[in-house]
Amino acid sequence: MIEAKIARGSAPLKYFAWISLALSCCFAGHPLAANRVAGLQADSVQNQAQQADIAFYGEHIIPISGSTRPVNFVAVKGDTIIYVGDRKDWQGSVGETMELGDRALLPGFIDAHGHLSFHSSIAGMANVASPPVGPAENIADLIQALRDFIQKSKPAQDQWVVGLGYDDSLLAEGRHPTIIDLDQVSLTLPILLMHVSGHLAAVNSRALEIAGINETSVNPPGGVIRRFTGSQKPNGVLEESATSAVHRFQAPSKDPFGDLRRGILDFASNGITTAQEGGASAASIKMLRAASRGSAFPIDVVAYRRVQEKNLADPDLHNIHSQKYRNGFRVGGIKMILDGSPQGKTAFLTEPYAVPPEGKGADYRGYSVMPAASVDALFEKFIGSATPILAHANGDAAADLFLNALARSLHPRKPMDHRTVMIHAQTVREDQLDRIAKMQVIPSYFSAHTFYWGD
């Protein structure tokens, strides 16, 4: 019999580290967690003397092996799945049997593109998203949501008020909130709203003042400070790398380890076996490693170190490589950001946007966040060291940067399992799909975007 170790960590998670429920996320108060599965096979010969702590029985059990043999019974002892197969072939004893009914039991999900630390931090942010996620149908609703949040949270003087998820395309006005709007909320508290894409931000005058952004400020490489039409005065909307000027002032969590643990349990409760920390900083990797040493994570967490133009010289980048799990955590490789987002109209396209952003000409195609020479150099370095690369590429021009760099780095080498992932890949062309298949790129499509922005 091939056994599967399933659990790490606290008792409430220990029976559920393999499991995700399609129709119900909890059984009898147990949060669902997930961990590794190692080739589960049914076995009716060696189970006679087995004693299981708990077993799951139902007609909708889907094993990872894809077995054609009947599978309606899963037995667990301690932290090990000891039997997967037909209930009538099980001859051991069971402490507790859980009937699934019409619910499904299946191997846990792997987070192919996520940001665990960010997810863990959102509890302290105002919800300024549009329906069905949030209340903001228009800018007046957004302003009211911020006022309600401030009244409830009572921030101290100059404490940043952070809102998450505003979407200009779903607001009735069809535009981003500016300092004119956000100054109505407060002139003394700095306000920072994160766009739903994560690639733009809207701030008030106090936030611009603290960040030192004014009429004389220049656009940073790979970013834009939007201005009022016919003026150099910033209107409060920041694109891409320009958002770093305000993000760095956000107060750190008072309980980062506690926030992280709560975030991990939230992932686990939704049946996720592996959570991703995509675009991790050196500091967040250090924090994740320290947290896992203190108490092993109940699910696997893999981090990909963020590489961008401004940190190419960071000394830790020379030591980044794909590591093995230790206490549920590992560094998996690097992540690059090549462009922005189509809904924010910062994705890098080969053809102009049908409706360009305010202040942009008819030939506006978005832009690359990183120059081609830097992309080429990073692919050469990390492909050469067999380190997986995740690269955010929304626009087809960004996908060209990705594919051209990969082709050049692979050309002098023998075929290899490079595990390079194109994150989002939302506007790839037919010819690019052919190249993706030929070079064995793994596309991680942002399919959920069609729910909000699809035609």
Image (spheres, grey):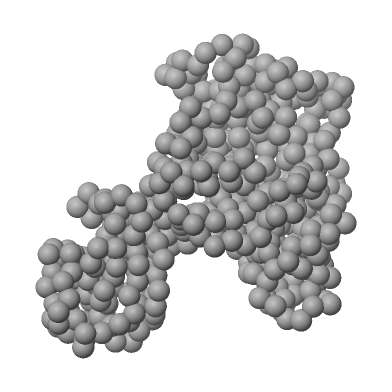
Residue 90 located left or right of residue 165: left
Would you place residue 424 above or below residue 160 in this image?
A: below
Residue 185 located left or right of residue 297: right
Count of numbered tags? 0
Q: Which is nearer the eye, 69 or 135?
A: 69
Residue visible at 40% across and 41% down in the picture: 262
Residue visible at 29% across and 70% down in the picture: 81
Q: Residue furthest front?
A: 293
Q: Which is nearer the eye, 26 or 360?
A: 26
Q: List x then y, in percent, for residue 65.
A: 39, 80
Q: Which is nearer the eye, 55 or 230?
A: 55
Residue visible at 40% across and 61% down in the picture: 35
Residue 26 located left or right of residue 420: left
Q: List x then y, in percent, for residue 335.
A: 67, 54
Please state, as top left, top right, bottom left or bottom right, where the C terminus lies in the image: bottom right
Q: Quadrant of residue 411?
A: bottom right
Would you place residue 283 above or below residue 101 in this image?
A: above
The reply to whether residue 262 is visible in this rendering is yes
The reply to whether residue 350 is visible in this rendering is no
Please state, as top left, top right, bottom left or bottom right, where the N terminus lies in the image: bottom left
Q: List x then y, in percent, for residue 264.
A: 42, 47
Q: List x then y, in percent, for residue 413.
A: 79, 78
Residue visible at 24% across and 68% down in the picture: 76
Q: Quadrant of residue 67?
A: bottom left
Q: Quadrant of residue 25?
A: bottom left
